[in-house]
């Protein structure tokens, strides 16, 4: 009976991780489309949720990698799996609170590896699998994404040079709907598989399915649903960082970044790499800034993201190890339940802290103030053209129409008789 309760608790926690993965990674697909107004915020997250769920049914290669390619099955117990999941969830919530788009994939892998190290030592980890399936893709994916997106953006900028801004904006916004949809579908083929792999690992450990079993359909459906639910709620804090914090992006850059992300993610899913879609999406957005003449890239924000990426595996691993030790010291189901209670308390505390400066669909596109650390404030709508004085996409057309006469009058009053500034 205790074993059954523990298995149920592990499955519930895995689905909770899937939920956090959904809202943590929504920005990977939709941040640029929201920033350029190609899609309304609520429409964007709904579309992403539907396509994330559909993508979860297209491939199981990554689930097999997570279940069988990173840790020795002989070193695994339900307590170990549970502790690893807690490590992943806590890191996801902390980085969400600070609006840092870190890797949910690496948070999960780090949590599991940390708990395995605490339980069985270094022999319990398949280091060759970690190197080839996690670390190398983590290093290569953002670099490849920057290169592909940078080249694509540069070519698009050259081809559309001299074309009226309203023409390119309208056309590429429609293109962004398609490219962002493709990223969402690709995200489902990669990230939804990770919780499937963890649940399969738990089922094998508990003896509920054979060691060579494939992922049961109910696991696929449950993981797809909870990721879609998390995606629909929208990780607005991270959407804001990706859409407004890295690059003041226009629709041409947005489409190039999204297309690059989709190509890299789908290719990695095909080969079963447990790729960080966050690393790919961030690299693509940075590449779109590098490749666009006159664009400004906020390297300070990028540096903070890089620091979070470097901390993800060890930080999540430390939490996973501590959680396993708590279970081991107390012992039995009560030890696991205590860790679960601590997880719930930590989650509630982080959520309450986030309410001090809420970010949602109504303010996600407000102007980014780097000096104030992304503090939200009202912004004047602009045309979306890269460079001064057009500093960002239009937030609301009606607002733009209402302030345009005042801006025009101000410029007239501050201009000398010979047309120069006094």
Image (cartoon, grey):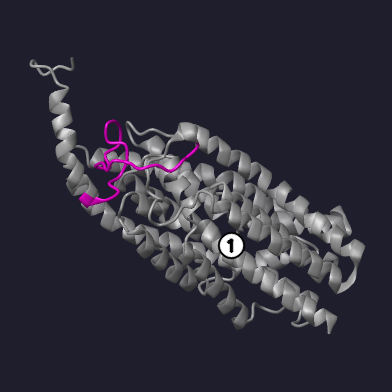
Q: Which residues are magenta?
A: 373-398
Does any portion of residue 73 appear in the rendered image? no
Report the magenta stretch's main SS.
Answer: loop
Residue 358 horizontal side relative to residue 379, left or right: right
> Quick check: is 376 in the magenta stretch?
yes
- Residue 120 is situated, as x and y percent measured from the top left of the image, at 88, 59
- Residue 35 is situated, as x and y percent measured from the top left of the image, at 36, 49
| Vertical placement of residue 128 versus 295, above or below | below
Q: Quadrant of residue 253?
A: top left
| Vertical placement of residue 80 versus 386, above or below | below
Measuring 32% from the left and 58% from the top, which residue is drawn there?
39
**Residue on which disc 1 sits:** 20
- Residue 128 is situated, as x and y percent measured from the top left of the image, at 74, 53
Quadrant housing the C terminus: top left
SS at circle 1: helix
Which residue is nearer to you in this view: 160 or 326?
326
């Amino acid at each position: 009976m205790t074993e059954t309760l523990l298995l149920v608790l592990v499955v519930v926690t895995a689905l909770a991780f899937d939920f956090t993965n959904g809202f943590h990674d929504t920005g990977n697909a939709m941040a640029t489309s929201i920033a350029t107004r190609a899609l309304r915020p609520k429409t964007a997250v709904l579309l992403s949720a539907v396509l994330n769920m559909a993508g979860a049914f297209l491939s199981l290669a990554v689930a097999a990698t997570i279940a069988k390619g990173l840790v020795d099955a002989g070193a695994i117990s339900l307590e170990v799996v549970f502790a690893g999941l807690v490590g992943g969830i806590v890191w996801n919530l902390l980085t969400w609170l600070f609006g840092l788009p870190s890797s949910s994939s690496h948070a999960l892998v780090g949590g599991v590896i940390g708990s395995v190290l605490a339980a069985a030592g270094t022999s319990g980890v398949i280091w060759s699998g970690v190197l080839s399936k996690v670390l190398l893709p983590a290093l290569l994916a953002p670099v490849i994404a920057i290169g592909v997106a940078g080249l694509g953006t540069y070519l698009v900028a050259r081809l559309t040079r001299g074309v009226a801004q309203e023409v390119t904006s309208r056309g590429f916004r429609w293109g962004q709907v398609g490219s962002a949809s493709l990223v969402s579908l690709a995200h489902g083929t990669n990230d939804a598989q990770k919780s499937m792999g963890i649940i399969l690992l738990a089922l094998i450990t508990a003896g509920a399915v054979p060691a060579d079993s494939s992922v049961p359909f109910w696991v696929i459906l449950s993981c797809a649903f909870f990721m879609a639910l998390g995606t629909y709620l929208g990780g607005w804090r991270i959407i804001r960082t990706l859409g407004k914090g890295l690059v003041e992006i226009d629709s041409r850059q947005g489409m190039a970044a999204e297309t690059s992300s989709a190509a890299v993610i789908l290719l990695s899913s095909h080969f079963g790499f447990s790729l960080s879609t966050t690393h790919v999406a961030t690299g693509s957005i940075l590449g779109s800034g590098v490749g666009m003449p006159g664009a400004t890239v906020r390297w300070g924000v990028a540096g903070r993201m890089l620091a979070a990426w470097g901390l993800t595996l060890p930080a999540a691993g430390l939490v996973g190890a501590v959680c396993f030790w708590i279970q081991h010291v107390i012992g039995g189901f009560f030890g696991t339940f205590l860790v679960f209670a601590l997880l719930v308390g930590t989650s509630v505390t982080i959520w309450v802290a986030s309410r001090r400066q809420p970010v949602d669909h109504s303010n996600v596109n407000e102007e980014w103030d780097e000096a104030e650390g992304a503090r939200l404030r009202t912004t004047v709508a602009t045309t979306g053209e890269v460079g001064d004085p057009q500093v960002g996409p239009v937030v609301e057309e009606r607002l733009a129409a209402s302030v345009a006469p005042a801006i025009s009058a101000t410029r007239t009053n501050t201009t000398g008789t010979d047309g120069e500034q006094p």
